[in-house]
Image (cartoon, rainbow, N blue to C red):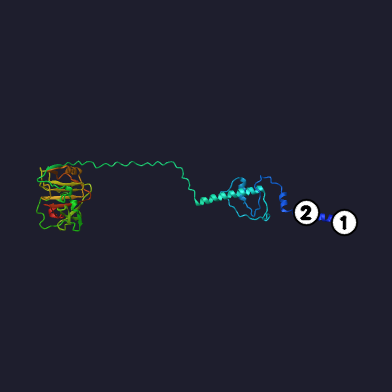
């Protein structure tokens, strides 16, 4: 064998090795060194990624335009058919993906925070509203009464107990109670003996709203006793027109100087007690109680100012107050309560 024949196998083997070297893929570490350097700014050393981020077309357009959606949705990384596990991405792409992941995480955290703790909307800045409140109308007390009253001398002593605490003078202390009886004028045997009894018909119509009785009075304790049940003891509620003047019942005999027909024994804002004599008590003569009127303030003031042996005298033509709707009337003779329904005594 010649020298050329001996070199031929060597040349063939070298050619095969050269072909294999040129065709067969280089080892991975050789590829890494052979990869041309990135023209982007180098970031951290790339690491193998087992997943990739598939950005939607709208997302990529938003990134290019510089506008990002309110909430970024991170989709699961799909393994590309052209990029197997363990493949390497460039430094620039790696940095870009990392920044995008951080921004998406920040937006997701903000959204979760708002869902847990909703942000209260700020109150609208409104100019202060000026509320105009009308000034309250002035309320004036009723004008003073134009009615005039005078004191007259008594015939006998005046009650020494305060009138407001006296069971014969202050009808309220006897606590009138409603009773069920016939609310019409009645005929009573033996009635009408005194033709000069106080005449209720001179100032009232017999339009009755309710009948009442009162309690007895215990002078030992100066307190009310049992409820009186006498069939001829009847107080009457008489219907009146609110605001109309209220007078005392008329009679022919006067008690002082031809003008005064009764003496006032007690006066309060809604109560009057007067006697058709100049006595200082109810023990003698006819006594009338009014309960439920608006007493004339001048009369109340004069009564409270009166002292000693003088009390206000009442005339037939001067009102003692004004009506409020119902006026309770009681009549007594020498201290005894009588039936106000008696036709012949008080209404003829």
Q: Label 1 vs label 2: CA separation?
A: 24 Å
Report the number of numbered marks: 2
| Residue at left offset 88%, top offset 55% | 4
Decide if residue 311 is on the left or right side of residue 100: left
| Res 303 → quadrant | top left
Tell which of 18 and 207 is nearer to you: 18
- Tell me if I can see residue 94 in this picture: yes
Tell which of 97 and 289 is nearer to you: 97
| Residue at left offset 59%, top offset 49% | 102
- What residue does disc 2 label? 21
Tell which of 230 and 257 is nearer to you: 230
Pointer 1 and pointer 2: residues touching (CB < 8 Å)? no
Tell which of 26 and 156 is nearer to you: 26
Across and down, in percent, residue 310 comes to 13, 43
Assess disc 2: are there few (<14), some (14-19) or many (≥20) residues with their C-alpha within 10 Å of its C-alpha. few
Across and down, in percent, residue 121 comes to 48, 47
In the rendering, which numbered label is found on residue 260?
none
Going from N to C along the chain, the mark reached first, 1 or 2, is: 1
- What residue does disc 1 label? 6
Across and down, in percent, residue 3 comes to 89, 55
| Res 139 → quadrant | top left
State which quarter of the image contains the N terminus. Answer: bottom right
Query: Judging from the image, what secondary structure is the residue with disc 2 in?
Result: helix
């Amino acid at each position: 064998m010649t020298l050329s024949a001996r070199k031929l196998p060597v040349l063939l083997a070298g050619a095969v090795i050269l072909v294999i070297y040129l065709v067969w893929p280089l080892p991975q570490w050789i590829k890494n060194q052979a990869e041309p350097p990135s023209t982007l700014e180098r970031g951290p050393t790339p690491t193998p990624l087992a997943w990739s981020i598939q950005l939607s077309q709208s997302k990529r357009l938003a990134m290019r335009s510089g506008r990002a959606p309110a909430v970024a949705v991170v989709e699961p990384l799909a393994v590309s058919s052209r990029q197997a596990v363990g493949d390497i991405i460039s430094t620039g792409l790696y940095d870009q993906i990392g920044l995008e992941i951080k921004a998406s995480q920040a937006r997701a955290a903000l959204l979760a925070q708002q869902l847990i703790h909703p942000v209260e909307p700020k109150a609208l800045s409104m100019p202060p509203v000026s509320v105009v409140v009308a000034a309250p109308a002035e309320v004036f007390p009723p004008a003073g009464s134009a009615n005039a009253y005078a004191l007259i001398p008594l015939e006998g002593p005046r009650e020494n107990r305060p009138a407001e605490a006296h069971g014969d003078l202050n009808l309220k202390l006897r606590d009138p109670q409603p009773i069920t009886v016939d609310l019409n004028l009645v005929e009573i045997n033996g009635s009408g003996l005194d033709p000069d009894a106080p005449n209720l018909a001179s100032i009232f119509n017999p339009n009755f709203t309710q009948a009442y009785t009162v309690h007895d009075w215990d002078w030992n304790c100066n307190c009310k006793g049992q409820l009186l049940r006498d069939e001829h003891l009847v107080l009457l509620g008489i219907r009146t027109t609110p605001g109309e003047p209220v007078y005392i019942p008329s009679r022919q005999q006067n008690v002082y100087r031809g003008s005064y027909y009764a003496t006032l024994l007690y006066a309060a804002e809604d109560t009057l007690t007067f006697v058709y004599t100049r006595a200082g008590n109810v023990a003698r003569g006819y006594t009338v109680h009014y309960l439920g009127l608006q007493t004339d303030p001048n009369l109340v003031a004069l009564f409270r100012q009166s002292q000693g042996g003088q009390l206000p005298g009442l005339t037939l033509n001067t009102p003692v107050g004004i009506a409020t709707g119902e006026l309770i009337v009681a009549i007594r003779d020498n201290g005894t309560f009588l039936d106000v329904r008696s036709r012949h005594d008080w209404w003829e």
